[in-house]
Image: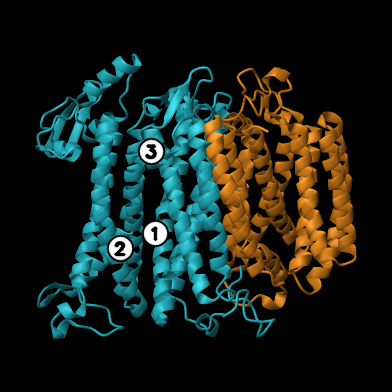
Chain colours: A orange, B cyan
Amino acid sequence: MELHDVWFVLIAVLWTGYFFLEGFDFGVGVLTKLLARNRAEKRVLINTIGPVWDGNEVWLLSAGGATFAAFPEWYATLFSGFYLPLLAILVCLIVRGVAFEYRAKRPEENWQRNWETAIFWCSLIPAFLWGVAFGNIVRGVRIDRNLEYVGSVGDLLNPYALLGGLVTLTLFTFHGAVFTALKTVGEIRERARRLALRVGLVTAVAALAFLLWTQAHSGNGRSLVALVVAVAALVVALVANQIGREGWAFALSGLTIVAAVAMLFLSLFPNVMPSTLDADWSLTVTNASSSPYTLKIMTWCAGIATPIVLLYQGWTYWVFRKRIGTQHIAEAAH
Amino acid sequence: MNLALAPETLARWQFGITTVYHFLFVPLTISLAALTAGLQTAWVRTEKEKYLRATKFWGKLFLINIAMGVVTGIVQEFQFGMNWSDYSRFVGDIFGAPLAFEALIAFFFESTFIGLWIFGWDKLPKKIHLACIWMVSLGTILSAYFILAANSWMQHPVGYRIDKAKGRAELTDFWAVLTQNTALSQAFHTLSAAFLTGGAFMVGIAAYHLLRKKHVGTMKTSLRLGLVTVAIAGLLTAVSGDTLGKVMFKQQPMKMAAAEALWDGQKPAPFSLFAYGDVEKGHNTVAIEIPGLLSFLADDNFSSYVPGINDVNKAEQQKFGPGDYRPNIPVAFWGFRWMIGFGMASFAIGLAGLWLTRKKFMLPQHLRVGEDEVPHLVLFRNKALGPQLTTWYWRIAIWTLAFPLIANSWGWIFTEMGRQPWVVYGVLQTRHAVSPGVSQGEVITSMTVFTLLYAILAVVEVKLLAKYVKAGPPELTEADLNPPTKIGGDIRDADKPMAFSY
């Protein structure tokens, strides 16, 4: 296995980490409209992710930075090509971050309601668009001989990619509902579990269709294994949720995300961004990657930093392990 | 195509707008993290309540700022790929690495420990909680270093070779990129300017309350901390600025000449106080100068030769082929002056404040005041400023908080525009760096969206800051004074509300 293959795996790991972690906080953001019945419940939801959402988001910045360093051509083609969807994602992430931090800083109801609306839409839109983006990456896009994207925005909104968007949106919402059931106490916890079942069933149908389509279009033996794991994990997650094993349900909804992302990357390899115009113009791990020297330095950095990050981020989750209910939200706190 | 709407022009405007805006928050975040950590350390060590109240007050303002710094930073990570894809392809092998290091090492640190600090008041024993804010501070400084090393490589590329076959620059020595003198002096200068910014911010807000005789105890402590920070950081900013100037003179003579509107080389070269020139003809029509000073700034010697804009332009034409290698001279000239002028003005106001509010033991008996009284501003041994002058000093001190922000912005505009037409000095020109596949409409869309969004957020942010500034330091609660002894919080009362919640 050469260094650029290692980096293909590491980029996949960073995206997986991002979707696993920010997946549930996107989901919780969507649930603020779907699940919470009053102000206090909304605040319970937001506070389940309060201390961690920012750290979760850094997985995206790491994936972006690492792609720049390890596969500059991929970084350049992807982000200049998917320009407007990426713009929408960035705007949402900006507004959403500010919304979490500023919402409670003024007591006026209007102020808080506006930020809550922002949290809902700015969680929903990126959760959907990331699926669209990855759908297009795996399916391939119009890339010319200079490795430039020459398609239009409309090309990105094809049925396959839109289905991908539906999958990430529902899967993250399911993951978020399971997370809420694990992190809350009281009536909201019960409702989160009931909602998780309904969202989970929709997810299962959408995900099965999307993953089978992926397998038929660009799959191989290894991606088939990942597909089976993803579907099985989702089914068992639903069962665990039904019998009230919330920890297991969360681990398994997480595994579904891990396996689904793995499947996408496995069907992609050794391409990183296939061209639909000519297979010779596809970006691959070889023609898109950095020099061996840069990859070596990056390997050292990631090899040392990533385990340490996992350690202290894990510790954060342990510090804030207590379940939260409406009784823990101070009336006047802002 | 109309040059004003050329993709290069638009992409540059967008980069300028988003980056200058981002950098309003960065220096405040860097310095307020460390200053808040310092105040919290004082609380943990002395258990004096005024330190805890100051920690909570400045910590809140710090959080309002860092939120904006973080979210506007996300754009920076992706903007290179969006608008500057040819740049990314050409330099990604080198430039990407410090960015990835920054994310993997610094951003994770910052954002994870900031969550622990915000929500950790009733979840962590106080020393561990204190350690969290220091970790945030370390993260902000590391982050600054990596990104400045990346920028320094654009000012003065080292540790690379050009791979002609692949048409790109490749890294050969990462250590050289991280430790070249450009990176060291830029980091030194930027970090001291960041502390000047935070110090002036503290001075300004403390002065606001002291002028109104409110929250005097906490604000006196804050004022002293702010003034001392301004004095030390201001001095270091001047010293490091001088070092950076000398580095720049060696590495980018054009930028130095442009900063001085020095059209033709002179020996000795004067420092220009004011100049009005004719760019077409390549000379100044009006100039007020201090003889020899530029020679000294550039080379430590009052009689050294300093090459002028026309000389360097000719030299670069011979080296790189025909073309105009001059940056926008008025922007470089005035940017350089506004940077120094505003930065040093806040340094001077800080030094004056430090003298005027000097410690008790240096004052005669009748001018000393108690713990909770507004200090007299004592000019000479036995002479305090009159009420009008006192009011004026406090007012000027309030305005100081904006000065370093203006200086920082012009510093960046100067150093980036002074490097033009190069994006990587001597290696890649800016016009070859833009994304060829991105349409004019797309860039206009994103520039409009970001500008509008940033404008709205600026209003929201400033109003929120003003609200919390006016409210002053919070009253302390039982929970504040009795931090938990166990990680995860004491279990005395499982249904007790959280000390902090969104």
Quarter occupied by the N terminus of chain A: top right
The Cα atoms of the two marked residues, 3 and 1, are separated by 22 Å
The amino acid on which the numbered mark 2 sits, given as a three-letter code, is Thr
Q: Where is residue A207 in the image (x, y as percent from the top left)?
A: 84, 44
- Tell me the residue that label 1 is attached to: B31
User: In the rendered view, would you say B443 is above or below A109?
Assistant: above
User: In the rendered view, would you say B12 is above or below A240?
Assistant: above
Callouts 2 and 1 close, C-beta under 8 Å? yes
**Chain at tag 2:** B
B441 to the left or right of A217: left
Residue nearest the viewer, comparing A106 with B138: B138
Q: Do labels 2 and 1 share a chain?
A: yes
| Residue B228 is at least partly visible in this image | yes
A131 to the left or right of A203: left
The amino acid on which the numbered mark 1 sits, given as a three-letter code, is Ser
Q: Earlier in the sequence, mark 3 or mark 2?
A: 3
The amino acid on which the numbered mark 3 sits, given as a three-letter code, is Ser
Q: Residue at x 81, y 34 (%)?
A: A159
Residue B229, numbered circle? 2
Q: Which residue is drawn at 66% across and 67% down?
A: A318
